């Protein structure tokens, strides 16, 4: 295995031995930092306590975010007719983008009451929430080649003396390029109509799943709200050790501090809302139907693979198995919930036999092909199933 000093080639990109799958990349970072733990330093932070965290507010406004383990009385949502949950999946988000676009072309895509997004799904969610007029924007994000720049300029030094191999400048720039005051205003208008947009992050300090009410943030309408909106999107996609965490300003018990937020997929690979939150104590009027759509930007069916007996490959396969198991568990419990309550259940995911990405990162050719695969499935009415994998 090459030494850390040879971790980049002449062009500054990761060589092939690291550039595999997302799980392999994470596994490598965990291994590298563990081996160099004695040399690792920490960036200074303002200390705060669990009591401070328990009473914290962002932008000095209550309810901009809730935690998944809070009492249901803390949540407030109108009756939900259709709910779209977008999972994590990195470059495989191109599949979800293709499905949304093909769904629009088929003329059967609903206007969702609630949209939630985790990780790459958190980047997709605001545009999916605003509707088909943003299909081309999403296609540009995932197929133009701009996403490939996210994994340029890796540095082991950032892992040892910072908190992420790649830095987050390009991720922040990508979010800022597509999310400006106009997007904020449009999300705020839809929020005023009773629709809800949720993006999930993981609060590392408290080890809790944070559910951000992006419409409520947008409704604030200030430059600070726009910054927070962008920060939450970037945090939701900030894979630990690959990208640095996003620090979000908060205040609790009169003290100001910064919370550390990373990829929502660490604690919730996809977010489907609990029964009490969906119903809020009341049923939809008459014979109105509620539908839950889970759009999984990855493969969820088990597959056989002869795993190489190496530390990185074993760690990679283990991490992948954990995420897949968590995703399947959420899907199964949501299916059971839907059947018990006579709701429409709809699931879409990448088929087990779809060719794997040829390399790590955001390979543009792979993402274009995956986008087209998702588009064609949805346009032909074959993207969704009502049965379990």
Image (spheres, rainbow, N blue to C red):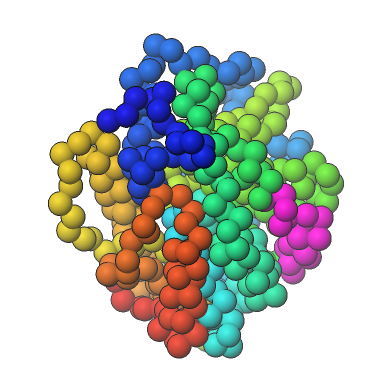
284 or 89: nearer the viewer: 89
Report the quarter where the N terminus lies: top left
Q: What secondary structure do most residues of the magenta stretch adopt?
A: helix
In the rendered structure, the answer to whether residue 51 lies left or right of residue 9 reads right
102 or 67: nearer the viewer: 102
Residue 349, picture quadrant: bottom left
Residue 190 within the segment the image draws in magenta: yes
- Residue with the most extreme right position: 222
Residue 146, picture quadrant: bottom right
15 or 334: nearer the viewer: 15
Looking at the rendering, the stretch of residues picked out in magenta corresponds to 175-193
Q: Is residue 332 visible?
A: no
336 or 284: nearer the viewer: 336
In the rendered structure, the answer to whether residue 245 lies left or right of residue 256 reads left
Q: Position of residue 49 (x, y in %)?
A: 57, 20
Count numbered badges in the picture: 0
Q: Position of residue 214 (x, y in %)?
A: 67, 53
Q: Is residue 370 visible?
A: yes
Q: Position of residue 374 (x, y in %)?
A: 46, 74
């Amino acid at each position: 295995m090459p030494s850390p000093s040879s971790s980049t080639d002449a062009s500054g990109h990761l060589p092939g031995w690291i550039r595999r799958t997302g799980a392999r990349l994470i596994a490598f970072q965990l291994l590298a930092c563990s081996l160099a733990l004695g040399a690792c330093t920490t960036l200074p932070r303002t200390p705060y306590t669990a009591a401070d965290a328990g009473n914290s507010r962002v932008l000095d406004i209550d309810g901009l975010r809730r935690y998944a383990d809070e009492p249901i009385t803390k949540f407030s949502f109108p009756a939900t007719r259709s709910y779209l949950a977008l999972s994590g999946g990195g470059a495989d988000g191109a599949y979800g983008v293709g499905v949304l676009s093909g769904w629009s072309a088929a003329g059967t895509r609903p206007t969702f009451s609630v949209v939630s997004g985790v990780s790459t799904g958190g980047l997709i969610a605001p545009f999916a929430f605003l509707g088909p007029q943003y299909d081309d924007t999403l296609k540009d994000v995932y197929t133009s080649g701009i996403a490939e720049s996210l994994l340029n300029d890796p540095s082991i030094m950032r892992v040892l003396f910072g908190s992420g191999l790649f830095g987050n400048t390009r991720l922040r720039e990508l979010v800022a390029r597509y999310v400006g005051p106009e997007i904020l205003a449009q999300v705020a208008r839809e929020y005023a109509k009773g629709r809800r947009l949720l993006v999930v992050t993981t609060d590392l300090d408290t080890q809790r799943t944070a559910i951000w009410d992006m419409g409520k943030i947008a409704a604030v309408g200030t430059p600070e709200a726009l910054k927070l909106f962008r920060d939450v999107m970037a945090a939701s996609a900030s894979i630990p050790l690959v990208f640095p965490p996003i620090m979000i300003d908060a205040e609790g018990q009169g003290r100001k501090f910064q919370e550390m937020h990373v990829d929502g997929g660490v604690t919730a690979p996809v977010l489907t809302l609990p029964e009490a939150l969906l119903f809020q104590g009341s049923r939809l009027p008459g014979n109105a139907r509620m539908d839950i759509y889970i759009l999984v930007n990855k493969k969820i069916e088990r597959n056989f693979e002869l795993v190489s007996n190496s530390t990185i490959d074993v760690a990679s396969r283990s991490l992948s198995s954990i995420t897949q198991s968590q995703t399947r568990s959420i899907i199964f419990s949501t299916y059971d919930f839907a059947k018990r309550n006579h709701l429409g259940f709809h699931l879409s995911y990448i088929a087990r036999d779809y060719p794997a990405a040829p390399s790590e990162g955001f390979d543009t050719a792979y993402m274009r092909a995956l986008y087209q695969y998702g588009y064609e499935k949805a346009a032909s009415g074959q993207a969704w199933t009502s049965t379990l994998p």
